[in-house]
Image: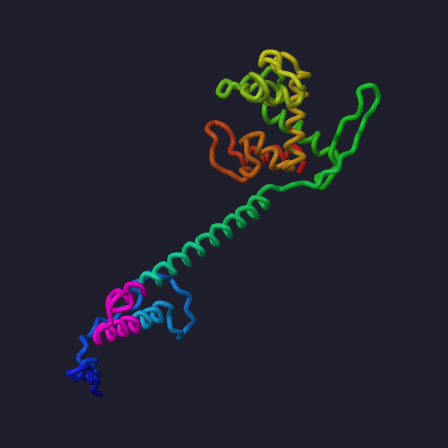
Amino acid sequence: MVWSQGAANVDISTKLQKKPERAAVVPGSLFPLVPKQLPGAESIDERRAKNLQAAYDRAGAIDDIGGSGTLGGSDYLQRAEDIMFNANKISQQASMTRLKNTLAQYQQVINQLQTPKVNVKTVVKGGGKGGGVTIPQGAMGKGAKARFIRAISGQESGGNYGAVNRDSGALGKYQIMPSNIAGPGGWDMEALGRNVTTQQFLSTPKLQEAIAQYKLSQYFNKYGAAGAASTWYSGSPSKWNNRDPQGNYPSIHNYVLSILKAMGM
């Protein structure tokens, strides 16, 4: 085919036939993907490579017949590559976000499964001048909270109000850390509405009972027996199955088992 342009005749077909050969785009060489692929189906990389090869060829044809500017030659191919690269990057970021959200949801489910919670109903026993004593009644049986509190005191000190741990400095029958009592605020303020000194706490069984029973009841009602025991020992309700040694002391797992066994569970 000959195209007449002014005084010169330009043979377009010959010009197109003489266009230089361009290197084929190797599948997967431009965009590292891990595509999902059905057996026998064309992969995403292969399909993308074919599209880029076609774009490359079109760019070459435009360049050979005099194309120029942003739509001609290497600029055309570079633009196509940039668009596809950015699209792939956005897709990968979206996939990572979905994966993180899914993992967070799974972790919430795992935490719920690892922290047994008892459906507790409150009943009041006793009466008279001293008033009633609040005791939970639920899946663990009547008086479970009272058994739990006794088990903690037995495990911690054997019921000794004057006990002081030589390693941690934990105080009294329930081995409460001094940092939970000393200074403004703390468990004493929560339970009593006032601050007491560590010496007052250690020398007064009634203070120990009031503060310890307040906090242990809070944990028990929120986490159940296993979660509350784990929290009292480690500070976390979800570590009750942790079997790592705690220095010269029982693992969190063994501590929780001892509490549950003392409760008759």
Q: Is residue 7 on the magenta stretch?
A: no
Q: Is 86 on the left-hand or right-hand side of 205? A: left
In the image, which residues are magenta?
53-80
Q: Position of residue 243 (x, y in %)?
A: 50, 38
Q: Is residue 74 on the magenta stretch?
A: yes
Q: Position of residue 44 (x, y in %)?
A: 38, 68
For the point 22% across and 71% down, the residue is 23
Q: Quadrant of residue 219?
A: top right
Q: Position of residue 127 (x, y in %)?
A: 83, 24
Asked if 47 appears above or below 260 in the picture, the reply is below
For the point 51% across and 33% down, the residue is 251
Q: Quadrant of residue 175?
A: top right
Q: Is 81 on the left-hand or right-hand side of 167? A: left
Nearest the eye: 151 or 183: 183
Q: Quadrant of residue 63?
A: bottom left
Q: How is the image coloured?
A: rainbow
Q: Residue furthest front?
A: 6
Q: Position of residue 149 (x, y in %)?
A: 66, 28
Asked if 117 appears above or below 196 in the picture, the reply is below
Q: Residue furthest right?
A: 128
Nearest the eye: 42 or 181: 42
